């Protein structure tokens, strides 16, 4: 069997492959929304649950937030530092995973399949070098994990022309599939969607909305009963009901009804205030958000937090909701692309944990002052070109160790200097007789020269 022109060996007829337990639901049905739901024929269908606003908001929010993060190919140097690199073997498939999807739509479909179905199956396409050149996300409802008697894992694929699977019941080995699962509650190869836990709340919310739509479609008037003081036969009751439905319901709501024979109209439905409609609808939406680990305010439910710290709110959302999905995606890509050491993949979190302008400038300035960043590294974060001399890390010399201060104090640098004393005047010594005679002779010679105008 060939997929994209490459040969894939199929399992022989003599070997038996056992399908794993599919209680996670491959057919779009959560069979046990509550204890006894299967016996009562209560089914929570995915196609119905996805129409609930809270489920749609959580799934699309998580998927688009992760999809907007750029996938980087990184390499670890001898010092343990990861730096972004480019490789002709691995970079192209990260930039363009397949022929009809860009990286954003590819990651978005990956996360959507994982959140809705609990499993993401990605078919790998290799070239003659055995290097993965394309990745195709399969329809989770058309893939079934199989386990051989020796423990080997295979996957049975149904026809999927868009992904290059042109035959039915194609069995491929696990090395050709990237399988990313949600928390596996029943079997290691079967992830369970969060909808398994919040599906019943979503159905309840849909029913509340449907009931509300019918209520307002009836002119915001509840149903009721017509009572008569005496006994009436079934024919008369049927006639009165037909007359009432035809003239005072639907588009005719609000018309004046004239009742005779002491007939009385009494409303019997519970109104929205008595049923606490808004509170019940909010509770179902918050239950959905709690299962997806999404803060309710981010899905448009409830009020915004009162404190103004965007970075802290985004950090909370990342740690409790996105981090596990992001780490799993990176690891699946590392193993699926069979990246050799020291290569790896990493999602650029700067697209998610962006700070406000004032905080961003302050953090960069503190990094440069603290000697952690070079000026050009800070400018790069602001998409500014580098400057000459900006690749040097600067640090002010303001602090000293206690030992250095002790050595300085040992030399008494702060002791008061002594005032210098004025030198005492020295008494001139009397010249000797020879010196006096020489000075006298010099004086006579000078006078003689001056007299004859030689000087």
Image: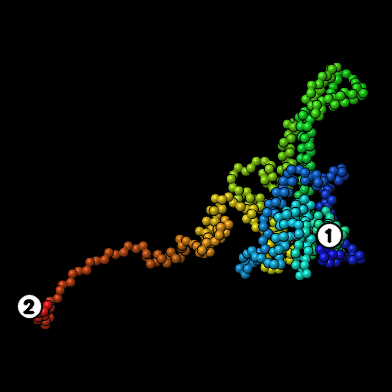
- Answer yes or no: is residue 144 visible: no
Give the label on residue 246, or none: none
Residue 14 relative to residue 50: left or right: right
Give how far apart the Cα atoms at labels 2 and 1 are: 133 Å
- The quadrant where residue 130 appears: bottom right
Q: Position of residue 60 (x, y in %)?
A: 72, 49
SS for callout 1: loop
Q: Is residue 168 above or below residue 212?
A: below
SS for callout 2: helix
Give the label on residue 451, or none: 2
The residue at 74%/41% (across/down) is 284
Q: Position of residue 344 (x, y in %)?
A: 68, 64
Q: Position of residue 413 (x, y in %)?
A: 37, 64
Q: Residue furthest bottom?
A: 434
Work out whether residue 237 or residue 92 is closer to the camera in this orientation and state it. Answer: 92
The residue at 73%/44% (across/down) is 54
The residue at 27%/64% (across/down) is 419
The crowd level at tag 2 (other Cα within 10 Å; few <14, some 14-19, many 20+) is few
């Amino acid at each position: 069997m060939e997929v994209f022109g490459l040969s894939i060996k199929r399992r022989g007829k003599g070997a038996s492959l056992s399908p794993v337990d599919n209680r996670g639901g491959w057919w779009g049905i959560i069979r046990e929304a509550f204890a006894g739901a299967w016996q009562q024929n209560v089914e929570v269908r995915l196609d119905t649950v996805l129409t609930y606003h809270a489920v749609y908001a959580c799934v699309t929010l998580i998927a688009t937030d992760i999809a907007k993060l750029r996938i980087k190919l990184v390499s670890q140097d001898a010092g343990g530092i990861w730096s972004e690199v480019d490789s002709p073997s691995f970079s192209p498939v990260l930039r363009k995973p397949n022929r009809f999807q860009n990286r954003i739509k590819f990651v978005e479909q990956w996360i959507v399949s994982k959140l809705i179905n609990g499993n993401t199956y990605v078919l790998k396409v290799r070239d003659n070098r055995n290097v993965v050149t394309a990745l195709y996300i399969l329809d989770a409802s058309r893939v079934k994990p199989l386990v051989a008697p020796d423990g080997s894992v295979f996957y049975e694929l149904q026809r999927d022309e868009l992904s290059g699977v042109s035959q039915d019941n194609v069995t491929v080995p696990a090395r050709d599939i990237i399988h990313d699962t949600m928390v596996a509650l029943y079997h290691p190869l079967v992830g369970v969607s969060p909808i398994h836990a919040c599906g019943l709340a979503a159905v309840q919310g849909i029913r509340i909305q449907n009931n509300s739509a019918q209520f307002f479609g009836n002119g915001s008037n509840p149903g009721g009963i017509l009572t008569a003081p005496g006994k009436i036969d079934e024919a008369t009751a049927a006639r009165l009901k037909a007359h009432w439905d035809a003239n005072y319901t639907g588009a005719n709501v609000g018309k004046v009804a004239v009742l005779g024979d002491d007939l009385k109209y009494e409303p019997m439905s519970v109104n929205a205030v008595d049923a606490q409609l808004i509170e019940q609808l909010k509770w179902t939406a918050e239950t959905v958000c709690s299962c997806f680990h999404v803060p309710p305010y981010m899905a448009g439910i409830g009020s915004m937090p009162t404190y103004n710290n965007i970075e802290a709110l985004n950090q909370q959302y990342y740690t409790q909701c996105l981090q596990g999905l992001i780490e799993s995606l990176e690891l699946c890509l590392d193993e699926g692309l069979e990246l050799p050491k020291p290569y790896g993949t990493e999602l650029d979190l700067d697209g998610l944990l962006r700070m406000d302008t004032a905080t961003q400038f302050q953090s960069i300035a503190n990094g440069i002052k603290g000697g952690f960043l070079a000026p050009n590294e800070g400018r790069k974060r602001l998409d500014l070109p580098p400057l000459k001399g900006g690749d040097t890390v600067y640090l002010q010399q303001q602090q000293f160790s206690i030992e250095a201060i002790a050595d300085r104090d040992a030399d008494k640098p702060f002791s008061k200097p002594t005032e210098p004393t004025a030198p005492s005047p020295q008494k001139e010594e009397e010249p000797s007789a020879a010196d006096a005679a020489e000075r006298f002779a010099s004086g006579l010679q000078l006078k003689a020269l001056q007299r004859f105008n030689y000087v």
